[in-house]
Image: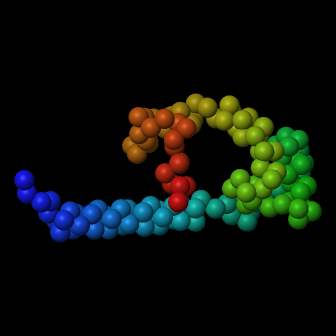
């Protein structure tokens, strides 16, 4: 019986660790780029605030807009889920999903990067897990 080649195993482990670190760095850069490119403009924020204050987006969104107006909250915190008031988005998001269901389905079907083998509850977990 020969002894394991620890130098070889150590080399392979080092290479695997380097590859993993590279993949994590790339994923982090992609996530940062995605967040940067998908920020609403000031005009979009202003329009959202006005529509929400008027009640065009529902009562919950109106409550949120008042909190934003009174500097008790921010839209960034609400949409990122960091706000304790983020739950008030639920009704608006549900209505948006229902109103745009067919377009969402079509966009998913047309996306060449969409992997249908990934269960919906696992989508996004890899991008947010540290």
Question: Looking at the image, how many numbered discs can be counted on the residues?
Answer: 0
* Scheme by which the image is coloured: rainbow
Front one among 3 and 92: 3
**32 sits left or right of 9 in the view:** right
> Residue at 41% of width from left, 39% of height from top?
115
In the picture as drawn, the residue positioned furthest to the left comes out as 1
Q: Nearer the viewer, residue 106 or 32?
A: 32
The outermost residue toward the front is 1
In the depicted structure, whether residue 14 falls above or below residue 3: below
Residue 7 place in picture, x, y as percent: 17, 69
Image location of residue 66, percent across then percent down: 91, 55
Regarding residue 48, the answer to whether it shows in the image is: no
User: Quick one: 69 or 5, which is closer to the camera?
Assistant: 5
Q: Is residue 130 above or below residue 116?
A: below
The spot of residue 2 in percent (x, y) is 8, 57
Decide if residue 80 is on the left or right side of residue 12.
right
Q: Residue at x 43, y 67 (%)?
A: 25
Asked if 96 appears above or below 47 in the picture, the reply is above
* Vertical arrangement, residue 124 with respect to residue 18, above or below: above
Residue 103 lies in quadrant: top right
Side of 10 where 42 appears, left or right:
right
Does the image show residue 87?
Answer: yes
In the rendered image, residue 42, in percent from the top left (x then y), is placed at 73, 65
Residue 12, image quadrant: bottom left
For the point 18% across and 65% down, the residue is 6
Which residue is depicted at the point 85% across and 43% down? Answer: 60
């Amino acid at each position: 019986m020969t002894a394991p080649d620890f130098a070889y195993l150590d080399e392979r482990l080092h290479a695997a660790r380097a590859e993993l670190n590279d993949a994590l760095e790339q994923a982090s850069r992609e996530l940062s780029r995605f967040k940067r490119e998908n920020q609403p403009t000031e005009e979009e924020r202003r329009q959202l605030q006005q529509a929400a204050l008027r009640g065009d987006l529902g009562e919950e969104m109106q409550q949120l807009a008042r909190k934003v107006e009174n500097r008790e909250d921010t839209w960034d915190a609400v949409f990122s889920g960091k706000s304790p008031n983020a739950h008030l988005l639920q009704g608006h998001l549900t209505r948006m999903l229902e109103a745009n269901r067919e377009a969402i389905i079509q966009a998913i079907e047309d996306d060449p990067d969409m992997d249908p083998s990934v269960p919906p509850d696992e989508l996004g977990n890899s991008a947010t897990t540290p």
